[in-house]
Image: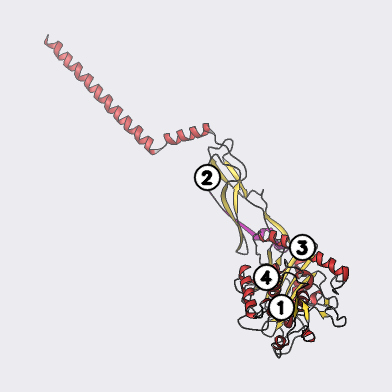
Amino acid sequence: MNPYICKKIKGVNYLMKKKLSVISALIMSIVIIAVSVVPASAVKNTIDFNTKTDILYLVNLDTDTVVYSKNSDKKCYPASTTKIMTYIITTEKVANLEDTKVEIKEDLLNELAGTGSSLSGLDQYVGKKLSVFQLLHCMMISSGNDAALVLADYVGNGDVSAFVKLMNDKAKELGCKDTNFVNPHGLHDDKQYTTAEDMLKIARYAMTTPYFTDITNTVEYYIEGDDENPLVNTNKMINPNEEGYYYKYAKGIKTGTTDEAGHCLVSTALKDDVSYMCVAYNAPCYDADGNELETNYAILESKKLYEWAYDNVSMRTVLGNEDKVCSVNVNYGEGADKVDLVPEFEYSTMLSKNVKDSDIKIETKCQDAVDAPVKEGTILGTASISYNGEELTRVNLVAADTVEKSQLKYIMIVAGNIVTSPLFLIIVGIIAVLFIAYVILVTRASSKKKEEKQIKLSKY
């Protein structure tokens, strides 16, 4: 039984859930901050089934590793996944979600008339007040455009466009490069767009906000005072009654559907302490003849991706920090004429079981030789790691050991280099020539003296 199958705002249980929600949000914040410092690595894993969903993006949240990607950087319409950002802005601008009350205005709800909006039944509360906490449930569980508009109007002080500006400012702050919002609910507008990569950044951040994980993982919700009309979560993946779609390891987050956007789903899953997030956009709503499809492929194929990942993908160490990758010659080394190079840091990534170790290519660039002394950890090269011709990462290669300098070897090598150097040979040659010339001159001078002496003696 899903622990969030039924949720009512009553008594001690509610207060306990509230405390636990805050604690879980803090823990999630720490986890995501820790993960965010790890460089993302993308391997183009192949899946064993065909997909109809145009955009699919699966990321391991524990390692920030892209496990599967299909058109993840393609612009698309976000539909009601827009409400993830609306949730973020609301919870950051409203300090007390439970005690802050918002009046439900009829003229505001009338703006949605005739738009085909998904609604959460706020028309029955016109003139009354609901808490921001309740409205967040209405928006995220039953995908109420009415709740999203009411929240945006309240936080924007009657100016929804001011709220939308906050949404776009936050998107930029989170590093989104291809996202733009023009409304808080996701009704189609050509100028409202995102990508799977951007929405994953938004959704991951949303997981750090108060109650987000709990609310989006709630199957049914009752507004206080109404025990007969539960709001039912549009995400069939978390509902045990939805045969074919239900996935017991799924943990939220948000659906979306318009004719232009197709079926959409941002979701997470947790199994055996391994967590994933999947973003699915633009799954078909209609067949080639224009008939509405009964199957929601965004949900169905997200579920299949999770099943495939848990069955086929695991963390694999490609390069350990003690793996000897290559070696570099060392000049004047004491007891060693070369030093082995190892990765500066271990490199691991998520790989499917059909990827062989031999499929991973490692190309190195190292110095030909270095002079001693060489300290352990000195960077002497790099290694490029690639799969299917695409570089996954580049790591520094460092000296595995310290090699001290041998003074004797240094002197001998330097002396040998001097003796065999062209300049030295030229100098020696010049000295030899000068010496020979000197000998010749001395010999001639000596001979001349002897001749002169003999001439003098012959006169006597």
Of callouts 1 and 3, which one flags the residue occurring earlier in the amino acid sequence?
1
Seen at 64% across and 60% down, the residue is: 39
Q: Quadrant of the N terminus?
A: bottom right
Q: What residue is shown with label 3?
A: 274
The front one of 303 and 357 is 303
Of callouts 3 and 2, which one flags the residue occurring earlier in the amino acid sequence?
3
Corner quadrant of residue 220:
bottom right
Q: What residue is shown with label 1?
A: 151
Residue 22 is situated, as x and y percent measured from the top left of the image, at 78, 64
Report the amino acid beneath label 1. Answer: Leu
Corner quadrant of residue 156:
bottom right
Q: What residue is shown with label 2?
A: 369
Q: Residues within 10 Å of mark 3 (few under 14, many from 20)?
A: few
Q: Residues within 10 Å of mark 2 (few under 14, many from 20)?
A: some
Residue 420 is situated, as x and y percent measured from the top left of the image, at 42, 36
Cα distance in 3D space between marks 3 and 2:
44 Å
Number of the front mark, 1 or 3: 1
Residue 314's place in the image compared with 256, above or below, is above
Report the amino acid beneath label 2. Answer: Ala
In the drawing, what numbered circle is on residue 118? none
Seen at 30% across and 31% down, the residue is: 433
Cα distance in 3D space between marks 2 and 4:
48 Å
Residue 209 is situated, as x and y percent measured from the top left of the image, at 73, 68
Label 2: which secondary element: strand
Residue 396's place in the image compared with 143, above or below, is above
Using the rendered image of the protein, determine whether residue 60 is visible from the camera's viewpoint. Answer: yes
Magenta highlight range: 348-369
Of callouts 3 and 4, which one flags the residue occurring earlier in the amino acid sequence?
4
Cα distance in 3D space between marks 1 and 2:
66 Å
